[in-house]
Image: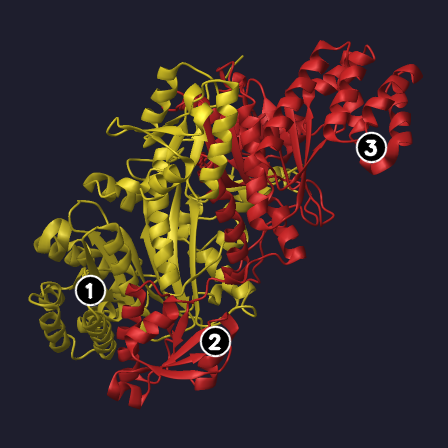
Chain colours: A yellow, B red
Amino acid sequence: MAQKPSIPKGTRDFTPAEMARRNYIFDTIRDVFHLFGFHQIETPAMENLSTLMGKYGEEGDKLLFKILNSGDFLRGVDPGLIETHDCPKIAAQTCEKGLRYDLTVPFARFVVMHRNELQFPFKRFQIQPVWRADRPQKGRYREFYQCDADVVGSDSLINEIELLQLVDEVFRRLGIRITIKLNNRKVLAGIADLVGAPDKIVDITVAIDKIDKIGLEKVQEELVERGLSPEAVKLITPVITLSGSNSERLEQLSSLLASSETGLKGIEELREVMAGTESLGLNADLELDVSLARGLNYYTGTIIEVKARDVEIGSITGGGRYDNLTGVFGLPGVSGVGISFGADRIYDVLNTLELYPSCITESVKVMFVNFGIAEAARSLAVIRELRSAGIAAEIYPDCAKMKKQMGRADALGIPFVAIIGESELADGTVTLKDMATGEQDRLSIPDIIRKLRGC
Amino acid sequence: MAQKPSIPKGTRDFTPAEMARRNYIFDTIRDVFHLFGFHQIETPAMENLSTLMGKYGEEGDKLLFKILNSGDFLRGVDPGLIETHDCPKIAAQTCEKGLRYDLTVPFARFVVMHRNELQFPFKRFQIQPVWRADRPQKGRYREFYQCDADVVGSDSLINEIELLQLVDEVFRRLGIRITIKLNNRKVLAGIADLVGAPDKIVDITVAIDKIDKIGLEKVQEELVERGLSPEAVKLITPVITLSGSNSERLEQLSSLLASSETGLKGIEELREVMAGTESLGLNADLELDVSLARGLNYYTGTIIEVKARDVEIGSITGGGRYDNLTGVFGLPGVSGVGISFGADRIYDVLNTLELYPSCITESVKVMFVNFGIAEAARSLAVIRELRSAGIAAEIYPDCAKMKKQMGRADALGIPFVAIIGESELADGTVTLKDMATGEQDRLSIPDIIRKLRGC
């Protein structure tokens, strides 16, 4: 019986038209990565579960795709364990490997394993798919690409300035207008210091992170719910309602957090990064946003988030500075800063705004019509010459009806059709039809090469 | 406790130097695919096991990596089943998905699911990793890339001629001298017809496929062992010991297989493909080899295999024509012909022969030395100008010792180092050091751009 095929939910096929668009995004990002001196690495899709488990929180562990051991996977499994129906424990004994969940943990492992071959500061980029057993929904997939660039082994804020320039250049090339939001984990720590509750830093940041969505009043309520006194909320309020230019906000912040050494350090870092970036010039808007908290437990310094200005969609790029990337794998003291481009959201933004250049379809320049054995043989010889000149060309492989052959050229958006019939066979010319204008010219091979090369 | 990290056996990390070499191979193949009018697709790493199982034989099923269902994977599993310790059956109930084993089955599924969006003949290429739970050994990995191009929906032998041209062009660009071996499944059927044992086609081809390795005498012994009469072996012997040029061999074969209609059809197809290919001109050696049997159960017409002439290694590319690619998924009558490049073996051949061009390292053109805050700020501004001109550049992010900074440029093979010290800061110049010659020049920005663009 024939099966009706399907693919796992949350995964996607990419057709040639989609691939052309995706390649345009990836190629743009890759070109800029190279321009800035980042070097590509790749890691295996499968990692040992010991590498992955415990790195993404309890929820993350559940979202790992686990690979059943080959062969007799029940060997050595305690029979009593199976009766307990304790799935996580059984999985731990029957699965050694899992699919990578992000590119950061594999990168950390890579740095540790290859540390003697690498030049530090090590500037790597990586563009590969990751897998998460999330509930699929609009814009959220179980397989998706991440595009990460990181510099490890350097504390210099020049790295932040470079990454912001890099982000700016990627989106300038893609034609997407963006706002880059900046914050610093130390400023968030400073806010917690301000109210004398350094242990409340997570509660405070989770609450103030919502200010754009739920407004000031609700944030204040939530802060109280999370155990802050009304006095503390009053102290925090001016910090999260800064106004004016970035330098005005930094001024206000300096006096508000004057009592916190950590906070002032964060402000100083922000000032240096922003000044350095602005002095070089930026297409993007750059905005200090002290409510920005993404990945708080991970970042230790600069926090970066990018929003598209013309499409309502979440963050399309994000990153920040972290300490101790590789400590968990036995190599302490490796700090770094990185940025991750959200390829799928960028794809959605480009589709919404129709920002793709017209030249990205990957069709050939010319298709030769097939009129039979002798004509096809001659066509193949001409095609060989065109290809030698770098011109992508093909022949319709079957001697099908003219209408069907032309239909293919039309459907694939092939700009020219070449015809070698009896008379062209006789005098060595080719009739070239411009599919857009319908114009036909009978040309020599060198003339065809000249014409198709120029377009 | 810090873990000592490792990766699953049979998988690999790729460092920047390795990536540069691999990208060179993939880019070369991709460029040629485009030149010949093939369009890229991608399919998910995970397929439903119902799509994969039973497509690669019993042995293949065992080599599939299966992904444990998320959440309560024991729900609905017959408790009695677990006690049976019947691993394949338990896996069938606890795993819905597996990692793709090759690109052909996912491609067949893709064609069926997207048939209404595709233009037939559909020329697709696909470059993605596949996974097999094979025992890892030298040159055999559990994760490796396949690079496939196929034309489906056309019976024309022009497709074979085009694919042979494509293979020739890929290896011409890579600088690898190759022999392309050709056979046709119908010729193998003709040999079985010749001895009146069409049911013995597999036995016969398995035996004669070994002639290069074990010699004629042993092949004859094996044929007898596999149930052929001494008379049948005598009949077969001249077929498998053809000599002379390809057309001489085809002549001999025609008279030897004169009684087999199928055999003669195969010879006719071989003649057409070889003549068409040779008339266009080929860098490769093209060789008729009736002992070539690869993937017999799969191919139905032309069989193609490529060997490197200067390195002892197995086949580095292979392919052929198949009928009914998609029948198992409910779409009968889709025939096609395809070719698959073995990226890992090609990589080994290029390494052995040291055929990489010198320009493939992906380092920046110039690294700016970091002498401190003011110098770095000026360097960043100059770097921005260089990048705008398309020149990859970077700054050493920390104000480290000169020796350390120069060491980085050296280790990464960066050809130029730029120095902005006090005096360059004063007059707006940059001192550029050629790392190969040691020469230093003090230049204006436009001069630097001119110089670095030209190299």
Q: Residue at label 1?
A: A282
Q: Residue at label 3?
A: B211
Residue A59: x, y in percent? 39, 47
Amino acid of disc 3: Ile
Q: Classify mark 1: residues with Cα within 10 Å, few (<14), some (14-19) or many (20+).
A: some
Please name the residue shown 45% across and 45% down the image: A64
> Quadrant where the C terminus of chain B lies?
bottom left
Amino acid of disc 1: Leu
> Residue A327 versus residue B157: which sits nearer the camera?
B157
Q: Residue at label 2?
A: B408
**Would you identify the image quadrant in which residue A190 lies?**
bottom left
Please name the residue shown 92% across and 15% down the image: B231
Amino acid of disc 2: Arg
Instruction: Report whether A273 appears left or right of B31.
Output: left
Would residue A280 be visible to someone looking at this image?
yes
Compared to residue B394, the image places residue B426 above or below, namely below
* Disc 1 chain ID: A
Residue B198: x, y in percent? 76, 12
Please tell me which of labels 3 and 2 falls first in the chain: 3
- Mark toward the viewer: 1 or 3: 3
